[in-house]
Image: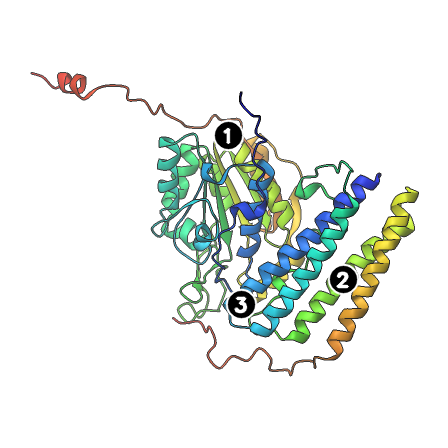
Amino acid sequence: MDVPVDPPVYTAKSYKSALKPIWCPGCGDFSVLSGIMRALTELQLPPHQVSLVSGIGCSSRLPAYSTLYGFHSVHGRALPVASGLKLSRPDLTVLAVGGDGDGFSIGGNHFVHACRRNVDMTYVVMDNSVYGMTKGQASPTTDPDWPGSKLTPDGPGVAAFKPLEMALSAGANFISRAFSGDPLELARHICEGIQHPGFSFIHVLSPCVTYRPEQKAWRENVHTGFAEPTDDRREAFLRLLDDDAFSTGILYKGRAGAFQPSTEATTTVASLGDQFAI
Amino acid sequence: METVEDFLAHAVALEEDSAVRFDDMADALEVHQNHEVTELFRRMAHYSRLHLAEAQKMAEGLNLPHFKPWEYKWPDAEPPETPGMDATHYLMTPHQALVMALDSEKRGQAFYADLAARNANEKIRALAAEFAEEEAEHVALLETMLAKYPEPSDDWDEDMDPPAAVD
């Protein structure tokens, strides 16, 4: 006779590895790690059923600090790796994480096409508007007049990348912005992002206390700009026109279905060969 | 907050979150070789776990409701006794760590005192008053500890080998 077994209960500890983060104390990325753990705990997802893929950078160290199946990939390439994984293993919950430089510059083209492709996965970008791991250069989201790097003493001089506008234009099916200083709300975004079909993009304002100490003031700047999500792209674009880059909340929850081709072969090598027979 | 079960669910979450955060901060400071502050944060986490055990014991036999992390009714974004992760610094001193812990305890005390004063449920008011009193003891204890650690000098965060920007 089968003995009924209670389903396992996962706590935040279930998802946390023994490795201690080497991030600077005070870094916003700690809260993102915590937000992911909270979301997974809430969803009671077995660690072996979740995969966490990253690129390169401070925030991309995140998979090492979890017990999930991690893939610390190549700079800017978290999304193609994560897409491939999800397409071949649709049974897994796939998360991709990284920073603004990794995601919007080195991996910028992958970001656009991951939004467009709309594979069912969740991408969390920890944006601190600086390349922290290489010690403080301007990134794609740095303001044009930021003078903090000797490489760009008068500021980078080019307009900052607008991740939410780009994600909406390119076709992401879930778009939100959260602040690392509000980790419970961030956990809600991650939870909803995971549950929403298609490509979910969560933009997290995550201060760099070492190279952008002035970002501590973000706590005073953030405000709930997107009180309720809309499924209307026109409405979402209108909201973004009024966005001061510190609006938080879930902006958009689209209705598009996720891209998931069959994992079964649709043809055979022999029949393909037949097509080329003369 | 309407029932004793609601109240105890909040009390458990409050202490649990505080313990986890102090442990996380201890880990962060340990990596940066700040052993004195690491030890202090570990002690704070230990105290929080002791209080957590007390709250859990009081909840024995009760069916506590499940709240999602963002559904709790906290006065601010996080549970009141959870110290802000962004207030840590790799060179922070024990004095600063204790000030941070003291602030956490004061917020916890204020949270319970407010419930004791305003909640409509008499049982919750009584329990909250008890918890507020206990928090007041922790505040007093931390103030005593703080008196033993001098305030840091103005150059406390001066690093002879700083993580300076390299271009």
Label 3 sits on a secondary structure element that is: helix
Q: Secondary structure at mark 1?
A: loop
Which residue: 83% across, 63% down?
B136
- CA–CA distance between discs 1 and 3? 40 Å
Residue at left 40%, top 38%? A114
* Image mark 1: chain: A
Which one is closest to the eye, mark 1 or mark 3? 3
For residue B36, say whether it is visible. yes
Above or below for A224 versus B140: above
Marks 2/3: CA–CA distance: 23 Å
Same-chain check, marks 2 and 3: yes
Tell me what residue is drawn at x 49 percent, y 26 percent: A256
Contact, mark 1 vs mark 3 (Cβ under 8 Å) = no
Say few, some or many: other residues with alpha carbon within 10 Å of mark 2 (under 14 / 14 to 19 / 20 or more).
many
Could you say which is closer to the camera, residue A182 or residue B42?
B42
Q: What residue is disc 3 on?
A: B30
Q: Amino acid at mark 1?
A: Pro
Q: Position of residue B15 (x, y in %)?
A: 71, 53
The quadrant the C terminus of chain A occupies is top left
Q: Is residue B104 left or right of residue B23?
A: right
Q: Position of residue B106 (x, y in %)?
A: 79, 62
Q: Which residue is mark 2?
A: B105
What's the amino acid at mark 2? Answer: Glu
Disc ID at residue B131: none
Is B8 on the left-hand or right-hand side of B37?
Answer: right
In the rendered structure, the residue with mark 2 lies on which chain?
B
Image mark 3: chain: B
Structure colour scheme: rainbow
Amino acid type, callout 3: Glu
| Picture disc at residue A197 | 1
Quadrant in which residue A135 is drawn = bottom left
- Check the image and name the residue furthest to the left: A278
